[in-house]
Image (tube, helix red, strand yellow):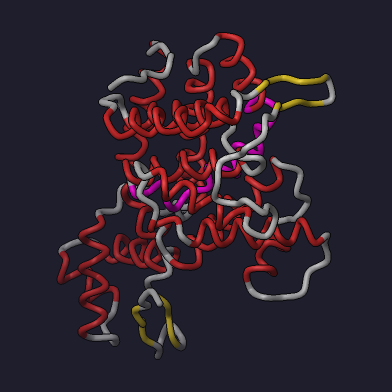
Amino acid sequence: MSYQPPFTITSKMLTLVSDIVEIITDIKHIETNLKTPKLRKKNRIKSITGTLQIEGNTFSEEKVTNVIEGKTVLGTMREIAEVQGAIKAYENFDNYVFKQEKDLLLSHKLMMDELLANAGSYRNTNVGVGDQNGMTHVAPPSLAVPELMGNLFEWLQNTKDHPLIVSCVFHYEFEFIHPFRDGNGRVGRLWQSVILNHYKKIFGFIPIESVVRENQKSYYKALEDAGSAEESTPFIEFMLGIILKTLKNASNENVPKNVPKNVPKNRLDEIVKLIEKNKEITSIQIAERLKVSDKTIKRDMATLKEQGRLQRVGSLKSGHWEVLHDE
């Protein structure tokens, strides 16, 4: 491997990686809930809204939802085009192969096709990144971009570093190279999520971009600090913290009130199977079959309702339970 991005493994990184791995294990019980079409759509909207707002788009989650649903919305042509492009890029999320440079180019084309004439191609002009205080980063010359991106993907394909760290390194290096005329922030954040999704599928269902938006000033400062340090270490530490925070938010938001966090998934599946066989079955009968208390089964059913896997049809006295399946 010829190119090695400069960064240093720190004790802070190792602690954050350990905490992230631990919480991923702890929240296995909510994965089914996160994967329900309704919640996945909600979190995807959060991702799209967050990543666009970082770039100055004023659309709210409600307006992004309206665009997805084909409703008329008020906004500039550019803002609407940005939303439509982001929707297309994220709709293809599960199809991207994170090690394939051509797939990253495709994501840019989908994201920016209505905004740039050369969407899906690297820039052929020199660019710089600045704010109200002036230029903060002069990107490498355009002629160097294809080789730099080729080196970065070669490293991505061969590195043995932990995927959590790899995703952060790639994000920073991508922003440093700034390979496109526009859309670099959006694609960089998307591609980190793509890398993470390859590592653990739960990352395809949580809105990391939304949490970055909530910490936007710190995000830009971490990029600047990494630039000053001439290595991505400060940015890696920042983004690992963002990932951990996103996972904690998902855990806190998706555990039903008054329901134990450690409900065994296999018991939930057994309840669903029993109801599929007999929709008139009662909680007491289920409790007897599974050798647990009626109170435990009622709590499990509350979990299944929260996950969108179960609904009550009719009254508690004369109605029945109905199993819901993903569309």
Give how far across and how far down residue 252 sits, in percent: 49, 44
Question: Which quadrant would the N terminus be assigned to in this image?
Answer: top left
Considering every residue shown, the one lying at the far top of the view is 229
Give how far across and how far down residue 256 sits, in percent: 46, 55
Question: Which quadrant would the C terminus be assigned to in this image?
Answer: bottom left
Q: Is residue 191 or residue 307 the one in the foreground?
A: 191
Asked where in the image residue 71 lies, by quadrant, the reply is bottom right
Asked where in the image residue 229 lies, by quadrant, the reply is top right
Give how far across and how far down residue 100 sits, in percent: 36, 45
Q: Residue at x 27, y 30 (%)?
A: 158
Q: Is residue 241 or residue 102 the one in the foreground?
A: 102
* Relative to 309, 144 lies left or right: right
Count of residue discs: 0
Q: Main secondary structure of the magenta part?
A: helix
Q: Is residue 278 above or below residue 175?
A: below
| Region of the chain picked out in magenta, as a range | 201-219
Q: Residue at x 63, y 44 (%)?
A: 183
**Magenta region includes residue 213:** yes
